[in-house]
Image (cartoon, helix red, strand yellow):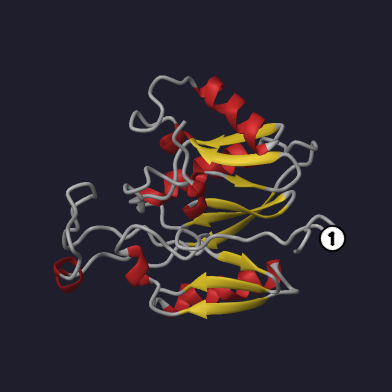
Amino acid sequence: MILEGGSIHVDGEGTCLTTEECLLNKNRNPNMTKEQIEDQLKAYLGVQKVIWLPYGLYGDDDTNGHIDNMCCFARPGVVLLSWTDDEKDPQFIRSMEAESILSNTSDANGRRLEIIKLHVPGPLYMTDEEAAGVVQDCNAKTRLPGTRLAASYVNFYISTGGIITPQFGDQKWDDEAVRVLSQVFPNHEVVRIEGAREIVLAGGNIHCITQQQPAALPGTVKLG
């Protein structure tokens, strides 16, 4: 089964988030049904419920719509959702459909989900200079000037006591993201990573290029 880390997000209490756009894409597991994929997620992640959103972030073609750019758990029962108020933005319908699903479902423990919206920046587009500076790979999507960048503040990293969040040079929404995340994680310091646009050019973001290392439970690690 083909499954990248960014295509799933779990709450630690039995609920998993993912997107149909990614896991049901014909380039992943074409011989598996949605039900079979869900059974595997439950078996290997130890979850009891999988919440499927139809799409990931608009323009996230490299990953075919990874969930970690669209929606994530802040804590059990609370999700952060990439959002735009611009009805003309193609992201609008994606966010609306996701909100509708999240609003009408519960997690594995029967809790209704609280939805906190994180407005996307821009929209941002690749410049001529940026496109020319990306080394083209035959296995990756061609980088062309004017391409919409899949920029999202949901793609942050949670560390012990800190939230590492991307910043894109859009002061209004950069500041708003920091404000929202500071409220959602009051016991964490929100650290801005300026220039995250450079990471997005390659099709990823902060969460995409990091790997969590969970702390071991006391008494479970033997040294020597």
Residue at horizontal 26 percent and vertical 64 percent from the top: 125
Picture layout, residue 140 above or below residue 209: above
Query: Disc 1 marks which amino acid?
Result: Pro
Q: Which residue is farthest right? A: 219
Q: Residue 83 in the image: state x and y as whole percent.
A: 50, 56
Q: Which residue is farthest front? A: 224
Residue at horizontal 43 percent and vertical 30 percent from the top: 24
Is residue 82 at all visible to an observer of this figure?
yes
Name the residue nearer the viewer: 6 or 144: 6
Is residue 123 at all visible to an observer of this figure?
no
Residue at horizontal 51 percent and vertical 23 percent from the top: 34
Q: Quadrant of the C terminus?
A: bottom right
Name the residue nearer the viewer: 59 or 172: 59
* Number of residue marks: 1
Picture layout, residue 14 above or below residue 193: above
Q: Residue 153 in the image: state x and y as whole percent.
A: 50, 64
Crowdedness near tag 1: few (<14), some (14–19) or many (≥20) residues, C-alpha within 10 Å = few
Q: In the drawing, does residue 105 fall left or right of residue 139?
A: right
Q: In the drawing, does residue 173 fall left or right of residue 220?
A: left
Tag 1 secondary structure: loop
Return the residue at label 1. Answer: 218
Q: Residue 69 in the image: state x and y as whole percent.
A: 47, 54
Q: Residue 12 in the image: state x and y as whole percent.
A: 72, 48
Q: Quadrant of residue 38?
A: top right
Picture layout, residue 149 above or below residue 51: below
Residue at horizontal 34 percent and vertical 57 percent from the top: 203
Q: Quadrant of residue 180?
A: bottom right
